[in-house]
Amino acid sequence: MLNENHTASYLQETQSILSQIINDQSGLLEDFVKRLLALRERRGRLFIIGVGGGGAGNGSHAQGDFEKIAHIDTTCLADNASSVTAYANDDGWETIFTEQLKRKNLSRNDALLVFSVGGGSENTSRNIVEAIKLAKTRGSEILGIVGRDGGFTKIHGDCVIVVPPNYEQHITGHTEEIQCVLWHMMVNNPQFTVTN
C-alpha cells in the first residue's frame, strides 16, 4: 500500500538536496563538465569505481552513458565479476581496482570517477582508497560524486561533488539517486553533442 506521506516527504527531500547542490556547488558542476570535455579532447580514458551495490550499479549504467552519449572511452571496473572476484580472492578486496588499473596502464592522460556513499576511508571501502592513491602516483585526475562528508575521495580528489547528507535515514538512497541525476545532466550537456 502506498504511503503518501512518505512518498511526498522523500521526494521533497530529494528536491531540497538538488536545490542545495545548485546553490552551493554549481561552480564544481561546471568544472566537472569542463574536465570531462578536456578528457575527451585529449582522448583519455575514464575509469569508474564504486562498490557496495549502488556504486557498482551506478558505475555500470554510467559507463554506457559516458561511452554512447559523451563519446568518452569509459570502463566500469566493477563490471567484470571474474576479474573482481579473482583479485579479491587472491590479493584481497582492497586490490580489486588497483590491480585492474595497473593492467590497463592507468596514466596521467586518464581519469578516475568515484561513485560512493562515504567516499572511502582507512576503515571502509579500502579498494576506493587504494585506487585513489594509485591514481595520484600516476598523475591521473580524480573525480567523484559522493555522500556524507566526502571521505578520502573529497580530501584527495581534483573535483568532487558531495551530496549533502541532510536526511540521515535516507543518506544512501539520496546519494545514489543524485549520482544518477548528476551524471545524466553532465552527459546531456550540449557541449558533448559535438564529437571529434
Image (spheres, grey):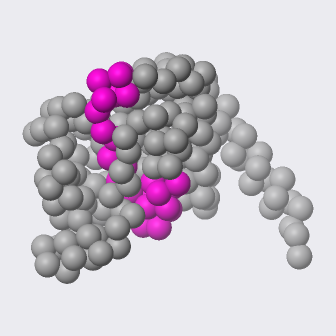
* Camera-side residue of 131 and 82: 82
Vertical side of 45 occupied by 75: above or below: below
User: Residue drawn at (86%, 67%), measured in percent from left and top?
Assistant: 3
Q: Residue 62: horizontal and vertical position, in percent?
A: 50, 48
User: Residue most toward the bottom?
Assistant: 89
Q: Could one spot residue 31 in this view of the protein? A: no
Q: Residue 136: horizontal and vertical position, in percent?
A: 16, 38
Q: Residue 65: horizontal and vertical position, in percent?
A: 53, 44
User: Residue drawn at (22%, 46%), measured in percent from left and top?
Assistant: 132
Answer left or right for 170 relative to 105.
right
Determine the image quadrant of residue 120. bottom left
Start and end of the magenta stretch? 38-61
Vertical side of 80 occupied by 174: above or below: above
User: Residue drawn at (21%, 58%), measured in percent from left and top?
Assistant: 100
* Camera-side residue of 147 and 177: 177
Answer left or right for 119 relative to 165.
left
Residue 49 lies in magenta, yes or no?
yes
Q: Could one spot residue 194 in this view of the protein? A: yes
Q: Residue 41: horizontal and vertical position, in percent?
A: 35, 22
How many tags in the picture? Answer: 0
Vertical side of 181 occupied by 44: above or below: above
Answer left or right for 67 relative to 46.
right
Determine the image quadrant of residue 69. top right
The quarter of the rendered structure image containing the N terminus is bottom right
The quarter of the rendered structure image containing the C terminus is top left
User: Residue most toward the front?
Assistant: 196
User: Residue drawn at (43%, 61%), measured in percent from left and top?
Assistant: 56
